[in-house]
Image (tube, helix red, strand yellow):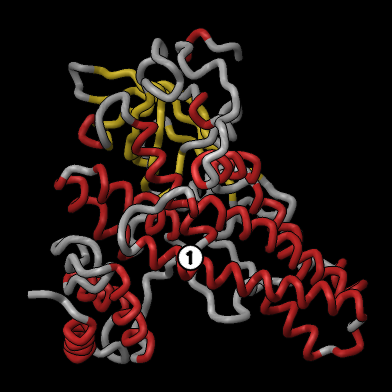
Amino acid sequence: MTLTAARLLTRTRDLLAAHPPATTDPADFLRARFDAGLAWVHYPEGLGGLGAPRTLQAVVDAELEAAGAPDNDPRRIGIGLGMAAPTILAYGTEEQKRRFLRPLWLGEEVWCQLFSEPGAGSDLAALGTRAVLDEAAGEWVVDGQKVWTSSAHTARWAILIARTDPSLPKHRGITYFLCDMHAPGVEVRPLRQITGEAEFNEVFLTGVRIPDTHRLGAVGEGWAVARTTLMNERVSIGGMRLPREGGMIAPVAAAWRERPGLRTHALHQRLLGLWVEAEVARLTAERLRQQLAAGQPGPEGSGMKLTFARLNQEISGLEVELLGEEGLLYEDWTMRRPEIVDFTGRDAGYRYLRAKGNSIEGGTSEILLNIVAERVLGLPAEPRDDKDTPWKDLAR
């Protein structure tokens, strides 16, 4: 039977009738929603979906929001939803999908990403974290260091890439794992940022044992798996759904309307230009999401993430200027380890400082410019002399 918007709407209303949000425990409601296939409708049946077109998720979400149904706090579990889940769906075994996807979507298990390293950030394929197979135990022993790890201090699981064959060129000989963040040998240390908080972490892995059953994809094929994660990451960062005049432009526009004494002609011209750019970016992101409904994310997400970073930095800079002396104030330098990044719920000083990280996280702007140039515009690739050299022979 073909699923239509009308059928999904009926199914959603049946869920609401059986589990009224006003009287149902939020956790119980979310479990019932997942089991009804209304978590992410484009996923297969039994995994929180119904095999329906991705575009129909909006029908479900709108009906649930109107009824006051609880959500799964997507900002807290964004790495799991936007990066781990689509990768597990694409490359995981049936056992892995059934083990990890349900608690991930319910928010019972938070995920983080162990990709970047002190010597392998922009050039991620140069990573040096090693994973050696203990054949007798059927486990991989992992040693190394990861850095810039959001949510590592709250995470139960991590997506991890490690080098399993240093004799191969750097893009080969990498394998992808699902790592238990509570396993012996995992040490998480905070990285205090310019905001005063430690939302990022560095993670040290010392003799960490990962069962081979927690390997995602074939041995040595981890780079292809990681690319799926990275493309989904850039879409989730740059292609988020926003209302008109939503996101970073909202507090600036509000201050402009509510405080006419702050206005100057020059600031007005800058605000108009950035408002238009923010609206263009919002509509472009909507079009990108519609394209995703027909398949996997492509390099276009890199362009959206580039735009997201630049606009956030320019808009937050304008806000600080608009507010004058008030814009130089900062609410609190207390060292904290937050669970979420809250751009619009904080003050202008926080937005200005935190936006500086947007051009680094999720792929540096320089790397994303290369991706757009080569994979979207079809320009010649940069000359490279290390693509066929064994990793162990590379200068470091």
Q: Is residue 332 above or below residue 306?
A: below
Residue positioned 63% across, 51% down in the render: 198
Give amino acid for label 1: Arg
Regarding residue 205, the answer to whether it shows in the image is: yes
Q: Residue at x 53, y 67 (%)?
A: 284
Evaluate whether residue 19 shows in this view: no
Residue sitting nearer the eye, 294 or 58? 294
Q: Residue at x 15, y 46 (%)?
A: 95
| Residue occupying the far left of the picture | 1
Q: Which residue is mark 1?
A: 75
Q: Is residue 106 above or below residue 89?
A: below
Q: Quarter of the image holding residue 382?
A: top right
* Element class at badge 1: loop
Q: Nearer the viewer, residue 366 or 40?
A: 366
Give the answer, above or below, for where 339 lies relative to 156: below
Q: Position of residue 312 (x, y in %)?
A: 68, 63
- Give the residue displayed 75% in from the left and 77% down from the top: 252
Q: For residue 384, which quarter of the picture? A: top right
Label 1 crowd bin: few (<14), some (14–19), many (20+), radius 10 Å: few
Nearest the camera: 46 or 282? 282
